[in-house]
Amino acid sequence: MKQLYERLYEATKSGQPVCLCVVIETKGAVPRHAGSKMLVYPNGLTFGSVGGGQVENETVNAALRALKSGHPEIIRYTLNAQEKNAVGICGGDVTVYIEPQSVRPVLLILGAGHVGRSVTKFAQLLDFRVVVADERTELCTSDQIPGEVEFLPIPMKDIPSQLQIDEQVYIVGVTQGSDVDVVGLPAILEHTPAYIGLIGSLKRWGTTKNALLDQGVPKEKIDLIKSPIGIDIEAETPDEIAISILAEVIQARNN
């Protein structure tokens, strides 16, 4: 049981989706007692057991559905072979509570400069798993950016090999220039994040967009990018810019 809780903790800490399945009630002869637990991962792998056999198969399928929907579920199984929907022959009943563990969305901040540091500072007050990426290793450290932050001191093009980019990832691009974006974004845009925005003027965005098109990046992928980033509040300082950016990210998340 201790190992199961340790695995559950590690999964939730790292942002890995996982579903906790618990036998909450039993009647009659059943393979596992109340309190038996099992973890189910998105790839169908499991740890622990709620009884094996068809009960477990059905529970895994229900857990995978719950991971997609985000909603918990309670399922009662009968193991009485004389009943219509029996999933076993032991003769008893098993009730399983299926709870997908909430996964904090990831805020991936591209760039550890002044604005990137401000975005990181305020983002830690929100319900995000904060990841900062910058190949300038001297900036991408806990000494420069304190708090509960993960660091990827690597080129932008290498990020997808270290961090899964999907609909749970919100990307804030606050790099030092269009040239950095042009080199790194094609690899990022092979995936589909929940949100991606880039800092800079309309002129900078025009330069970046044309360069991405010249590299063969599909227009529909480029159109996912919001630039200039942030809600217009006439922001000037790094902190003000960070607040305008995070307001837009929150809006995207809540919509």
Image: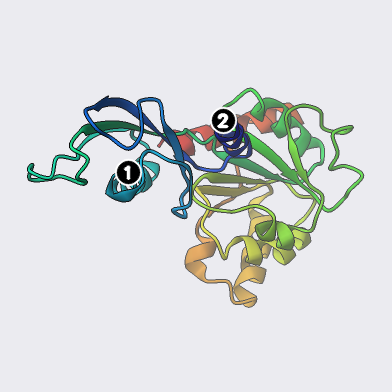
> What SS does tag 2 mark?
helix
User: Relative to 44, is 199 on the left or the right?
Assistant: right
Instruction: Kindly indicate whether the residue at mark 2 contacts the one at mark 1 (C-beta within 8 angstroms).
Output: no
Circle 1 residue: 59
User: Relative to 102, is 129 on the left or the right?
Assistant: right
Q: Sequence order check: which comes first, mark 1 or mark 2?
A: 2
Tell me where residue 32 appears, x and y as whole percent: 35, 34
Badge 1 crowding class, 10 Å Cα cut-off, few under 14, some 14 to 19, many 20 or more, is many
Circle 2 residue: 5
User: Relative to 117, is 213 on the left or the right?
Assistant: left
Tell me where residue 26 appears, x and y as whole percent: 27, 27
> What SS does tag 1 mark?
helix
Residue 98, compared with residue 225, is above or below; it is above
Which circle marks residue 243 in the picture? none
Type of the residue with mark 2: Tyr
Residue 149, compared with residue 202, is above or below; it is above
Q: From the image, which quarter does the C terminus lie in? A: top left
Instruction: Answer yes or no: is residue 135 visible.
Output: yes
Type of the residue with mark 1: Thr
Q: Nearer the viewer, residue 72 or 180?
A: 72
